[in-house]
Image (cartoon, rainbow, N blue to C red):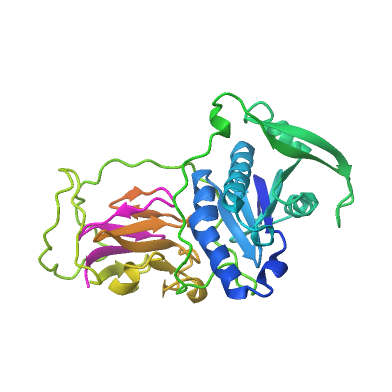
């Protein structure tokens, strides 16, 4: 059983039962939009790893306390912006607690006293605020553009020792990079309902091993030599499309046309995945992973995360977006950054965990 040092974020939606009562479908859809279009991308920007979700809560691991604090404050700032102008009874508010310490790693999940402390600290937070342990405050003080209010020692449930906590306060620091928030993508009001949400009422299972790799930049795509893990079926003539520069030509296709991903896993088991053109045109796209209740398309392989990647057709171009998976997604040997869609062309070699496939018209 492995152990490692981690920064742990525990977040909870305030008044989840109240929001669901009388407006269940509306609340479900709104939380699904927030999860897919706001919260998950924020985690990706700060190299956070979603460990688990349970109804209205989520557990996230970071390799850096600084990244964890910045992510938490970004989440609260974005939620405050979204709640502006909405009736108070429809505000979606988060409580967030942060702790740092040694955790026990068991497969895709993390356990231990420090995880429990993060959850208990979260329960002490006022709606819309971030509470941290003194360990987190000591680790980040002077490194982030925020101040801290000492809330003293607290006794928390099932923890014998007192836990000293602090509220994180946003301050104006003349353009301090730590307090500036990235531009947010507009989030549609009506989501696709084709995919189950981590905010369903059932207990979710863990997602990918919670390591926190630094973002990896990759150079322009170059044609790759054939590799022995599988070959594409004979390609159809490529439809005409606008040029995209000398280093990479995206694969354009007519609306509602499908794609095929053919190859094999590490053991040599054949893989033949069909991407439905109609779903690709939807805002949710086609989500690929290990668990059927979270994905349109699944493959039973331990190297695949429960929600591994999203395929989508954007302006006629096929794209792939890694969803913070454990083992990552690569194109022609270059690992891509999570939550950033990357265009594909016919013949692109895509690695999804230990599955390697080639893109072709389907």
Quadrant placement of the N terminus: bottom right
Location of residue 295 with respect to 345 vertically, above or below: below
Residue positioned 53% across, 38% down in the render: 181
Residue 277 in view here: yes
Residue 355 in view here: no
Residue 81 horizontal/vertical position (percent)? 58, 47
Q: Nearer the viewer, residue 67 or 41?
A: 41
Q: Residue furthest top?
A: 174
Is 119 within the magenta?
A: no
Q: Nearer the viewer, residue 111 or 268?
A: 111
Q: Nearer the viewer, residue 34 or 304?
A: 34
Quadrant placement of the C terminus: bottom left
Residue 193 horizontal/vertical position (percent)? 47, 73
The stretch of residues the image draws in magenta is: 337-362
Report which quarter residue 278 is drawn in: bottom left
Report which quarter residue 139 is drawn in: top right
Residue positioned 52% across, 53% down in the render: 38
């Amino acid at each position: 059983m492995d152990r490692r040092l981690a920064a742990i974020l525990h977040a909870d939606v305030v008044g989840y039962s109240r929001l669901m009562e009388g407006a269940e479908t509306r609340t479900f859809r709104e939380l699904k939009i927030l999860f897919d279009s706001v919260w998950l991308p924020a985690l990706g920007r700060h190299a956070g790893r979603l460990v688990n979700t349970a109804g209205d809560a989520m557990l996230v691991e970071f390799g850096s306390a600084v990244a964890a604090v910045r992510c938490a404050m970004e989440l609260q700032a974005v939620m405050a912006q979204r709640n502006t102008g909405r009736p108070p009874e429809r505000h979606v508010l988060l409580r967030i607690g942060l702790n740092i310490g040694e955790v026990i790693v068991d497969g895709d999940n993390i356990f231990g006293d420090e995880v429990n402390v993060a959850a208990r600290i979260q329960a002490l937070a006022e709606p819309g605020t971030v509470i941290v342990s003194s360990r987190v405050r000591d680790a980040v003080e002077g490194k982030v553009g925020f101040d801290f209010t000492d809330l003293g020692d607290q006794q928390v449930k099932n923890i014998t020792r007192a836990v000293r906590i602090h509220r994180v306060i946003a301050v104006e620091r003349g353009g301090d990079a730590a307090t500036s928030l990235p531009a947010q993508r507009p989030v549609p009001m009506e989501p696709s309902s084709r995919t189950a949400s981590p905010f369903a009422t059932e207990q979710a299972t863990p997602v990918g091993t919670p390591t926190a790799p630094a973002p990896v930049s990759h150079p322009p795509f170059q044609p790759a030599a054939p590799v022995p893990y599988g070959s594409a079926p004979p390609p159809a003539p490529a439809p005409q499309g606008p040029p995209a520069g000398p280093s990479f030509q995206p694969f354009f296709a007519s609306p509602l046309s499908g794609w095929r991903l053919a190859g094999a896993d590490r053991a040599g088991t054949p893989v033949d995945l069909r991407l439905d053109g109609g779903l690709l045109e939807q805002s949710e796209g086609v989500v690929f992973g290990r668990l059927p209740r979270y994905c349109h398309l699944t493959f039973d392989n331990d190297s695949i995360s429960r929600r591994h990647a999203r395929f989508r057709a954007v302006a006629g171009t096929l794209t792939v977006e890694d969803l913070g998976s454990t083992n990552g997604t690569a194109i022609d040997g270059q690992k891509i950054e999570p939550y950033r869609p990357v265009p594909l062309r016919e013949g692109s070699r895509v690695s999804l965990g230990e599955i390697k496939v080639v893109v072709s018209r389907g």
